[in-house]
Image (cartoon, helix red, strand yellow):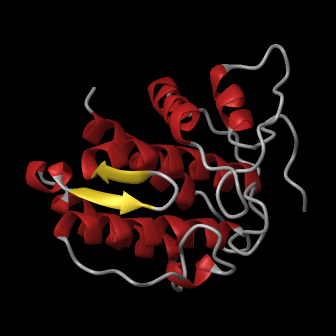
């Protein structure tokens, strides 16, 4: 499976989880520290706009949804699911072979091709899909191939600082790959989300 296909599969899973969020759950806590479910959705929507800008060479200066932002939920609009879908629909077609060959500089990572950034985007999408699902009490089984991509990317590139990833946690001894990957990225998948 190529990286673009994997990325689209990660997006499909996110879409299904976003669709399961109830109207009264958007402003509840997520598993992402200090962000509500709406905030996580807003960050992911922001990521679509940022990716499109990288792909097209456009300037994108909006920081409301960037990692560590205090209120990325403003990016989600009144209907976060439809806002996500519109952002995705605008972003994906720009990811041409030519665009994926472009390079950009990412703070904390350095200069990388857009194709290489798709692994970061898969990691972000998979992790935040779980953050949202866990926040709304929805059990979610992530695709093992996507978990492997996220775990591999994390081991090579994780940035541990506020607004990015938390400290690595120790997963239970009998944990599956998904739980171990999430623990590596600072999430206690074996504990309920704090209300």
Which sits in the foreground, 89 or 52? 52
* Total marks placed: 0
Instruction: Measuring from the top left, give residue 72's x and y in whole percent.
Output: 60, 77
Position of 100 compared to 105: left or right?
left
Quadrant (top left/top right/bottom left/bottom right) for the C terminus: bottom right
Which sits in the foreground, 170 or 133? 170
The image quarter containing residue 92 is bottom left
Residue in the image at 11% along x and 48% along y: 97
Instruction: Measuring from the top left, give residue 184's x and y in whole percent.
Output: 70, 34
Residue in the image at 54% along x and 82% along y: 64
Instruction: Measuring from the top left, give residue 43's x and y in whole percent.
Output: 54, 69
Instruction: Measuring from the top left, give residue 182's x and y in whole percent.
Output: 68, 37
Quadrant (top left/top right/bottom left/bottom right) for the N terminus: top left
Position of 29 compared to 20: left or right?
right
Which sits in the foreground, 156 or 185? 156
The image quarter containing residue 36 is bottom right
In the depicted structure, whether residue 116 falls above or below residue 163: above
Question: From this viewpoint, which residue is outermost toward the left?
Answer: 98
Residue in the image at 87% along x and 40% along y: 191
Residue in the image at 87% along x and 46% along y: 192
The image quarter containing residue 190 is top right
């Amino acid at each position: 499976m190529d990286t673009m296909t994997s990325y689209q599969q990660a997006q499909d899973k996110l879409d299904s989880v976003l669709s399961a969020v109830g109207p009264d759950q958007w402003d509840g806590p997520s598993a992402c520290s200090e962000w509500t479910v709406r905030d996580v959705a807003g960050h992911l929507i922001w990521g679509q706009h940022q990716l499109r800008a990288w792909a097209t060479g456009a300037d994108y200066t909006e920081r409301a949804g960037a990692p560590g932002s205090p209120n990325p939920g403003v990016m989600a609009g009144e209907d976060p699911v439809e806002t996500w879908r519109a952002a995705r629909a605008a972003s994906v077609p720009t990811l041409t072979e030519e665009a994926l060959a472009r390079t950009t500089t990412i703070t904390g990572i350095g200069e990388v091709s857009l194709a290489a950034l798709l692994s970061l985007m898969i990691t972000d999408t998979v992790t935040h899909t779980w953050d949202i699902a866990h926040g709304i009490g929805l059990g979610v089984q992530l695709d093992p191939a996507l978990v492997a991509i996220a775990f591999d990317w994390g081991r090579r590139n994780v940035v541990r600082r506020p607004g990015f990833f938390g400290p690595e946690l120790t997963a239970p001894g009998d944990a599956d790959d998904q739980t171990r990957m999430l623990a590596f990225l600072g999430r206690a998948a074996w504990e309920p989300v704090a209300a």
